Image (tube, helix red, strand yellow):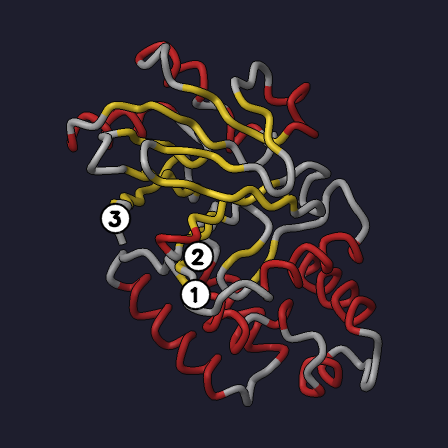
Amino acid sequence: MSAHIHQFLCLKDNFGVLVHDPESRHTAAIDAPEAGPILEALAAREWTLTEILITHHHQDHIGGIPGLKAEFPEARIIGPAREADKIGHLDQAVREGDQVKVGQLEAMVLEVPGHTSGHVVYWFEQDDILFTGDTLFAMGCGRGFEEPANILYNSLMKLAALPGELQVYCGHEYTLSNAEFALTIEPDNVLLRDRVAEVRQLRAENRFTLPTTITIELGTNPFLRVDEPSVQAAVGMPGGDPAAVFAELRERKNRA
């Protein structure tokens, strides 16, 4: 892997992430929750911000853009074309299948509507890295604010079909609360129980729970396991349509 990744907290529980290409010395911020911590991380590593890759328009993902641009006016803002009017000026408006460059690093854009209508993720295929914003979380998923549940379900299945070894970075440190909910759905899932124990230990040590992987999520994330009899039984829908099971599961998480 040639990309250097630095992860840190912004706001209360947002993740700031920097992606650095050591060959060209280009550095991208994945979303811009808050300018201060991102600028501090850049300064500590003597990295120059060259790109800002936005996943979706929510304020806790774009609020830091003005402060970052004030310090790095040449940094290019890249984000979903379907949300350009909500994000503001984009130097590159991207859609499904578009390529994004961070120096010599290259990411493919995948559209994953659901949490918001234009949400995108960035897949650095050669580096086995995926930045999922607020669509896929460790042992969870984002709320479907702007699209019905079946749209969000289809987006998650799109991500679930990606290579299992992908290192998945999400937009928030929600893993422990997601884990506790997942246990109410599949208390007998051995992989899940082991993962929850690991997460509890990490958080007790004030360590981050990310990245996860697609393989780990397929074994422990109930929102990716709605075709499993154990998940279907847990929501009282044995043999149910997976999309309908997902909708019920998401409603239960909303109320949790």
Look at discs 3 and 2 and give the one toward the viewer.
Answer: 3
Q: CA distance from mark 3 to mark 2?
A: 16 Å
Q: Amino acid at mark 2?
A: Val
- Counting residues from the N terminus, which is met first, the one under dot 3 or under dot 1? 3
Q: Using the rendered view, name the quadrant where residue 58 is placed.
A: top right
- The N terminus: image quadrant: bottom left
Look at discs 3 and 1 and give the one toward the viewer.
Answer: 3
Q: SS class of the residue under badge 3?
A: loop
Q: Residue at x 78, y 73 (%)?
A: 242
Q: Is residue 101 left or right of residue 144?
A: left
Q: Are marks 1 and 2 in contact (CB under 8 Å)?
A: yes
Residue assigned mark 1: 213
Q: CA distance from mark 3 to mark 1?
A: 18 Å
Q: Using the rendered view, name the quadrant where residue 29 is placed.
A: top left
User: Residue 190: where, in percent of width, then height?
Assistant: 47, 88
Identify whether 93 is placed above or below 1. above
Give the crowd class for mark 1: few <14, some 14-19, many >=20 residues within 10 Å.
some
Q: SS class of the residue under badge 2?
A: strand
Residue assigned mark 3: 2
Looking at the picture, tell me which residue is in the foreground, 161 or 15: 161
User: Residue 216: where, in percent of width, then height?
Assistant: 46, 72
Q: CA distance from mark 1 to mark 2?
A: 5 Å
Q: Is residue 64 left or right of residue 91?
A: left
Q: SS class of the residue under badge 1?
A: strand
Residue assigned mark 2: 168
Give the crowd class for mark 2: few <14, some 14-19, many >=20 residues within 10 Å.
many
User: Residue 20: where, in percent of width, then height?
Assistant: 27, 37
- Counting residues from the N terminus, which is met first, the one under dot 1 or under dot 2? 2
Q: Amino acid at mark 3?
A: Ser
Q: Is residue 162 left or right of residue 37?
A: right
Q: Are marks 3 and 2 in contact (CB under 8 Å)?
A: no
Looking at the picture, tell me which residue is in the foreground, 154 or 249: 154
